[in-house]
Image: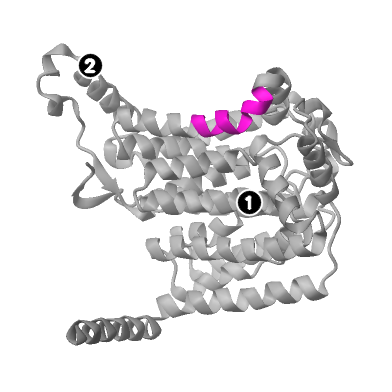
């Protein structure tokens, strides 16, 4: 018994020694500690900015009061436009904080640190950045403000998205899809990740696995929305999943240089949608599915496997209808997800200031996936941060932001595609 205890103690000491000697492990812990201190100072000394909190609480009070018609759930900034998960999350926040801002700021500060820890774990798993570049994840004035001075629902959305990504890179696909659906239930911007996620699912699972994972995600949406679907289904679907909203030109960070009549026009929206779809198809064909022979060959192989599986001649030997499924590398998963979302960001009709949280945590990763020199990577990072801190945005800042985005996108396009699979490892 004593020998076992001594062995465990020596093993723990060796592990601790290994951790403290490895900058790739100790540095993230130092970053989390430093940022926790910074968050505390911001909450204590920087005034809170009132934007959407009162509207959130008004909408939650209506929900807790028994209102189930989405058109009657309103706040001082307008009607409720988020799916049902938003109401459950902010109802819980109201229960914990009593609807008061200061305890909510503390809660969001904790949320910020948890999110940082998850995204650092994702970065360490991929090992794309040098250890010192992880510090870039702490250097956004705007993102700190979004979390603890604005209390936006984007914070919970991105926390769940990053948790979903962490689950997926550890091959927990069904769990990842459930968490992903939870993120969608708070804010729909997460759907920008859906196209690359679907491609990754088709690579990593057979069609039965894909369908079951999607069914689990759909079940989450149905269960969360059930009280509203039963009572006022049209009102809920039309408002919670309104894809035709036109944002106010004044608040646009990315297309302020576009004249307002063009900005609000349907032709501009359609042009951006075509560009979005075109870029997704191009990256899917030439980058994400390159090692499968391109997007068309990849989809054809899936169709063939489905036909073989459904064919009576292969029913006696079920293995004949299965594709050879291999485990995807974490780097390939994260690259595909981050690039797919980044394409959506570039083609978004309007980006408001809180939308920076949608992709800020992917910027260092994307920069290091290009072949640009380190100095240029850092300058691009600083340039993007500068644009997001210009208030109000103007024609110059928005045009500069678009140019910086396009430079990064070109770097990602011209960079070599990593081999997507773990060698000699197959999924069950």
Give the position of the N terminus as an image quadrant. bottom left
The residue carrying pointer 1 sits among few (fewer than 14), some (14 to 19) or many (20 or more) residues within 10 Å by Cα, namely many
Are the two marked residues, 1 and 2, in contact with CB atoms closer than 8 angstroms? no
Give the position of the C terminus as an image quadrant. top left
Question: Which residue is the site of mark 2?
Answer: 310
Cα–Cα span, label 1 and label 2: 42 Å
Question: For the magenta stretch, what is the residue range?
Answer: 218-229
**Residue at the extreme right:** 76
Residue at image point 34% right, 86% down: 17
- The image position of residue 79, as x and y in percent, is 82, 33
Residue at image point 45% right, 33% down: 216
Marks counted in the figure total 2
Q: Earlier in the sequence, mark 1 or mark 2?
A: 1
Residue at image point 60% right, 33% down: 224
Asked whether 427 falls inside the magenta stretch, the response is no
The residue carrying pointer 2 sits among few (fewer than 14), some (14 to 19) or many (20 or more) residues within 10 Å by Cα, namely few
- The answer to whether 150 appears left or right of 209 in the picture is right
Residue at image point 71% right, 47% down: 90
Label 1 secondary element:
helix
Question: Which residue is the site of mark 1?
Answer: 156
Q: Which mark is residue 321?
A: none
Viewer-nearest of labels 1 and 2?
A: 1
Q: Is residue 91 visible?
A: yes
**Residue 64 position by quadrant:** top right
């Amino acid at each position: 018994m004593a020998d076992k205890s001594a062995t465990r103690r020596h093993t723990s000491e060796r592990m601790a020694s290994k951790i403290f000697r490895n900058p790739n492990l100790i540095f993230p812990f130092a970053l989390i500690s430093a940022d926790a201190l910074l968050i505390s100072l911001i909450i204590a000394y920087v005034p809170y900015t009132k934007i959407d909190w009162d509207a959130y609480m008004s909408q939650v009070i209506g929900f807790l009061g028994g209102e189930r018609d989405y058109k009657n759930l309103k706040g001082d900034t307008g009607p409720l436009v988020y799916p049902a998960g938003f109401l459950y999350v902010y109802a819980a926040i109201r229960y914990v904080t009593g609807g008061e801002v200061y305890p909510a700021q503390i809660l969001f500060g904790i949320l910020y640190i948890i999110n940082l820890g998850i995204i650092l774990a994702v970065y360490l798993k991929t090992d794309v950045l040098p250890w010192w570049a992880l510090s870039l994840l702490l250097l956004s004035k705007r993102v700190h403000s979004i979390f603890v001075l604005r209390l936006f629902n984007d914070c919970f959305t991105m926390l769940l998205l990053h948790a979903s990504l962490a689950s997926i890179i550890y091959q927990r696909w069904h769990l990842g899809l459930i968490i992903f659906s939870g993120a969608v239930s708070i804010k729909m911007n997460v759907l920008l990740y859906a196209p690359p996620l679907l491609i990754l699912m088709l690579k990593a699972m057979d069609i039965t696995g894909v369908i079951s994972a999607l069914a689990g995600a759909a079940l989450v949406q149905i269960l969360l929305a059930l009280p509203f679907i039963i009572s006022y289904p049209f009102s809920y679907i039309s408002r919670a999943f309104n894809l035709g909203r036109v944002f106010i030109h004044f608040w646009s960070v990315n297309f302020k240089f576009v004249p307002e009549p063009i900005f609000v026009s349907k032709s501009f929206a359609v042009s951006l949608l075509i560009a979005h779809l075109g870029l997704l198809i191009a990256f899917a064909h030439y980058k994400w599915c390159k090692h499968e022979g391109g997007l068309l060959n990849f989809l054809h192989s899936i169709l063939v496997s489905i036909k073989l599986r459904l064919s009576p001649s292969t029913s006696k030997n079920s293995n004949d209808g299965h594709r050879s499924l291999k485990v995807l590398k974490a780097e390939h998963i994260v690259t595909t997800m981050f690039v797919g979302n980044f394409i959506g960001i570039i083609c978004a009709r309007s980006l408001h200031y809180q939308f920076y949280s949608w992709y800020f945590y992917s910027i260092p990763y994307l920069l290091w996936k290009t072949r640009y020199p380190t100095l240029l990577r850092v300058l691009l990072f600083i340039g993007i941060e500068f644009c997001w801190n210009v208030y109000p945005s103007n024609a110059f800042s928005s045009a500069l932001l678009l140019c910086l985005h396009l430079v990064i996108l070109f770097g990602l396009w011209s960079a070599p595609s990593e081999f997507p699979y773990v060698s000699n490892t197959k999924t069950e």
